[in-house]
Image (cartoon, rainbow, N blue to C red):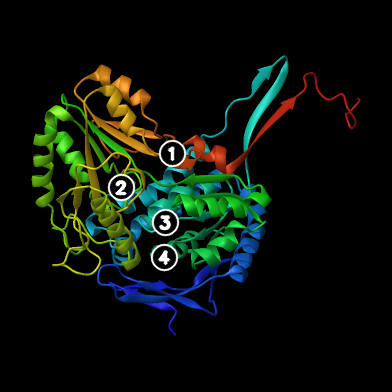
Amino acid sequence: MSDQAVLEGVSVDTRHWIGGQRVASPGTFTDVSPIDEQPLAEIAAGRAPEVDQAVAAAQAAFPGWAAMPAAERAALLHRVADGIDKRAEELAVVETRDNGSLLRSHRRSVMPRVGMNFRYFADLLRDLAQPDREIRGHRERITWDPAGVTAVITPWNAPLMLATWRIGPALAAGNTVVAKPPEWAPLTASLLADITAEAGLPPGVFNVVQGLGPEAGAALAAHPGIRRMSFTGSVPTAGRIAAAAAPNIVPLSFELGGKSPLLVFADADFDLAVSLAVEQFDNAGQVCLGAFRILVQDSIAEEFLAAVLEKARAVVQGDPRDPATGISCLVSRLHLERVDGFVQRATAAGATVALGGAPNRELGGLFYQPTILTPVPAGAEILTEEVFGPVLTMQTFTSEDEAVARANATRFGLAATMVTGDPERAERVSARLRAGTVWVNCFFVRDLGAPFGGSGQSGIGREGGTHSFDFYCDLKNTVFAPNGWTGPGASHG
């Protein structure tokens, strides 16, 4: 069986990358394109032996990588970013084929962000040190020491961008990495391995073990050689990872689900609010930060719904490689059935379908119609659980207090968006929203230096800027006594 897959003219190795070498496995799993549900490749299926091998390689590489001067480490990471930029088109077409996201988005924003994930943290590494402080005549120094081997487990909706958002700072911090890509979209992680090798990363600094979650993922989560664990995905999977990692006392960083609100007040820029509402259909709703619960002030609700429906109906659904497409497909047959199950249960419980509400019969395959449900009974499952598909709900509110109460009526707290023309209201309401990120009159504006993470069951910890180094490093406080050495070994002249 061939160990190479060719997609859109790009050759991708389907084996693991461990210790600077390609490694096969006795078994494989099939990678299927969501665009047409056709098999793309047979991927090496790692289990505990491959995980053991990868962790051992990362452990062996760690002392040299951690001891490398920061300027040299940063220079290598810039070379990785250069390689990503050079191969951005290949990465874009492969990831589009692999996970069904829009090709134009990969070209315009996703792949440039992948390179930036390495450049930003490489540059930040050079400026990380802070001056010594004085404390009661003593000299105190704060340092960020590399922690060890980092496990990075990432999802399929933006596999390379979300992986490198963790891999970049982990490597910059001096850690070595074992990455486990998603089984539904593993291919760009293999290309990243090639890029790191071409950039000159020493063998074992970056490793990729492919496989299924219950096999490769579980083995990685429980491995005693792991010193940091970063995971993006669902709450149930995070619980299993936390339980597996607990005996080894491994620090965890989790970015989990979201059920974010979009609050639209009567004084809002109406056209902006409508555009932001329809923007939530991006990536067929497979976006953790998406504001899928639309909360609109009752005095403009009827007009607002009509405008949103008109704009949503104009969005083209189809092949993600077509520049005219605005909404693509879901990632798998299993996921489509899950999304449709949420919608069917919601309508059975009393929700009304204002738009869509079923798979797209004209396109077939894994295309699900952009869907809006309104009204929806209070407390309904569709309002509290993450659907992760192109499904919006719309509720109304009268007062600020009611808007905040409905916005916070979920166990999640990843993000929130609000649109208002009143600056004082913006300050009041944003302060009361329970969310890791709040956008006011904008959406998805991200800065790599800002803290990112969720409240409630949307996650644990924050990453971004120095917050990433705080997680991927062991912070050390060293205090030097004044007036030289007085203890054993002191020189007496």
Q: Nearer the viewer, residue 492 or 301?
A: 301
Q: Secondary structure at mark 3?
A: loop
The kind of secondary structure element at disc 4 is loop
What is the x, y in percent for residue 239? 53, 51
Q: Nearer the N terminus, badge 4 or badge 2? A: 4
Question: CA–CA distance between discs 4 and 3?
Answer: 9 Å
| Comparing labels 4 and 2, the label whose residue is closer to the camera | 2
Residue 310 drawn at (x, y percent): 8, 46
Mark 2 vs 1: CB contact within 8 A: no
Nearer to us of marks 4 and 1 is 1
Residue 403 visible: yes
Residue lying at 35% horizontally and 56% vertically, measured from the top left: 157
How far is the residue under mark 1 from the one under mark 3? 16 Å
Q: CA distance from mark 3 to mark 2?
A: 22 Å
Q: Is residue 393 above or below residue 222?
A: above
Work out whether mark 3 precedes mark 2 in sequence or the reverse, and give the earlier one. Answer: 3
- Residue 117 versus residue 203 in the image, above or below: above
Residue 250 at what x, y percent from top left?
Answer: 63, 48
The reply to whether residue 167 is in sight is no
Q: Which residue is mark 1?
A: 454
- The amino acid at mark 2 is Ile
Task: Determine which quarter of the picture holds residue 203.
Answer: bottom right
65 relative position to 193: left or right: right
The residue that label 3 is drawn on is 155
Query: Closer to the N terminus: mark 2 or mark 1?
Result: 2
**Residues packed near mark 2 inside 10 Å, few (<14), some (14 to 19) or many (20 plus):** many
* Closer mark to the observer between disc 2 and disc 1: 2
User: Which residue type carries mark 4?
Assistant: Pro
Q: Which residue is mark 2?
A: 382
Which label was assigned to residue 186? 4
The image quadrant where one finds the C terminus is top right
